[in-house]
Image: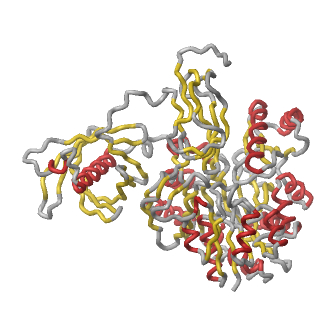
Amino acid sequence: MLTLLIANRGEIALRIMHTAKREGYRTLAVFSDADRDSPHVRSADAAIAIGGSTSATAYLDVKKIIAAAKQGGADAIHPGYGFLSENPRLAQACVEGGLSFIGPDAATIALMGNKRQAKVFAESAGIRCIPGFHGNQDNKQWLNEAKKLGFPIMLKAASGGGGRGMRLANDTDELTAGLKSVKNEAQSAFGDDEIIMEKALRNARHIEIQIFSDSLGNTLHLGERDCSIQRRHQKIIEESPAPGVDETLRQNMGKAAVKLANACNYRGAGTVEFLLDEQNNFYFLEMNTRLQVEHGVTEMCYGVDLVAWQLKVARGEPLPFSQQQLHHRGHCIEVRLYAEDPQQNFLPQTGRVHYWRVPQGEGIRMDHALAEGMEISHYYDPMLGKLLCWGENREQARRRLSATLNDLAYLGPVNNQFFLYKILESAAFIAGAVHSGFLTQQIPMLMGGEEGKKPAADTLAIAVLLLHEEAIESGDRQSGRANWRTSVNPLPLNYRLGIHSSSYSCQILPLGRDADGVESYSITVQEQTFRARLLHQNCANITFELNGLCQNALGIIKQQALYLFHRQCQWHISNITYQPASSEPQLGNGKILAPMDGSLIEIHVATGMQVRRGETLALMEAMKMEHLLRANCNGVVTAVHANTGSQLRNGQLLIEIKPCAELKLENP
């Protein structure tokens, strides 16, 4: 039996294991210290610890991966996506170590992995590319070339990927600032500060073609995926077929992708990405020499298993189909569920998963590595999983996906579930008017209402009901709530609930029990009064009645906090009834706290320095993203409590500033 080592983690590791076991492979996992209890470790036939917690000290260490493969008796290595999947050093190390690498050879990865080299090669193969510049790295020349191209322009790290190392510049000032920041990020993230410049195409579509080649000279494509809806240059929604792409355009892009694959002697699964302008002209963007995150969209539309194809090709076997035998059916849409809070500028979230049930149903697929009790850490990408829904047509797929998101049974770190739901229900998405500027144009509308920002009155009423019933059941004798229910003439009890930095006052009063022994309450919140009853509670599943209407929700209380899912939103609600009201304002108090778990990358201030409100004080990294920490007041830095490289915890005090009304604008 062949043994396959999966040099990855999370949902893609589980995805590969599922197919590999079905294909008769023994599976071997690797895991970092932070992933010791992760689902992919428990699901493999064997697992090997490689130490470290960060990507650099674990999954990006080629020597550790090869050593683990030899220790576990592996015959082949599958890199998944991300990490070392497009690193030619791993592919070459496999060859030198007598291992099969599930992917193209090292030379092809190196050629297509550098955006400058890939563009030059694509142009030589007759593939049209976006006008740009990728020569001398002198800033003055870049300014001249940008003026020739015309703004806006896009700066990209030549060795970049995953949305990192990219900046849009609308004028010379933004270009000057962007050149420095992109080079710094490129060096930090990829160890290479080379960048390229391209003309930015406004409202272009991001279309990618799935290609596949075997070692016998056969290459085919499996249609297109539209990946235009992106945030921070990272895809969040993908679908196939692409809205508005007709058969002629589809075949022309497919032929161009196959032509490029043949030109570079490609082998295995790959994706050729194009930008499609408003006149339906398509331009080569880049080639991903690996399995894509969104490969499941293609699988659901073609009824194939691309991982099985990868293993087949790696064994030297031919592709199982010809181009003529492949037929696209129906429509599939995928959304990426991220542990991030859209209401806090998409700040990554960490914490424990308290409740999780995989959605089931016709045309529904959930790729994930979630498990109740597991910890979502700050070390890796914040993606929790991918939810895909297939339908006979786009509208059926959209409705199915929207309904599944609405009912997703998850309680844990806040995620972007409600944001995705709002996108799917927006008029622009329903009309198929998707393009690279979609979110820039739509976010003000998607985030404009109070829905999703502050809990509705009925949501708060449910929270009070659940917290009060928990206090009764747990015997909250210190507060008197345990005996309050049996009092002859009970007075209303006051509750104060905390959500983010806001607090909400509520009252609850018992009205007596019905024939079934269920207590009724009168709950007043935000000048609204509800008659409420808790009808049923099983684990996190709750059935309640508000003003005669029976409803369902998810709710679970952990460590004095209520995790409540209602109206497509998850709320983390604290019972702060007995906490003293803070006399210290949270904004402008001079205390700079870490907004999440992460690593401190840079510190720009020292004790005694004067700073202005909004000035950048430090830079931290969490879940593969950088976050600026800014001064919340004018003042003088009195203390710095962390060093560059420090591992930070959410809420940790980092910098203290003594607020000053006026500054002399001089630093020692």
Q: Quadrant of residue 508?
A: top left
Residue 573 position (above or below residue 104): above
Residue 153 position in % (x across, y down)? 78, 40
Q: Is residue 249 visible?
A: no
In-image side of 546 versus 572 (left or right): left
Q: How many marks?
A: 0
Percent from the top left, x then y, of residue 297?
63, 67
- Which quadrant of the structure image shows residue 138? top right
Q: Is residue 354 above or below residue 187?
A: below
- Residue ID at (65%, 61%): 51
Q: What residue is rendered at 92% in x and 58% in y?
A: 124
Q: Quadrant of residue 630?
A: top right
Q: What is the x, y in percent for residue 176?
A: 78, 33
Residue 419 is left or right of residue 304, and the answer is left
Picture residue at 61% right of the left edge, 55% below the top? 380
Q: Quadrant of the N terminus?
A: bottom right
Quadrant containing the C terminus in the rendered view? top right
Q: Using the image as rendered, state which of residue 554 and residue 364 is in the foreground.
A: 554
Which x, y percent locates residue 260? Answer: 85, 65
Task: Judge left or right: residue 200 versus residue 433.
Answer: right
| Between 617 and 277, the one nearer to me in the picture | 617
Q: Residue at x 83, y 67 (%)?
A: 92
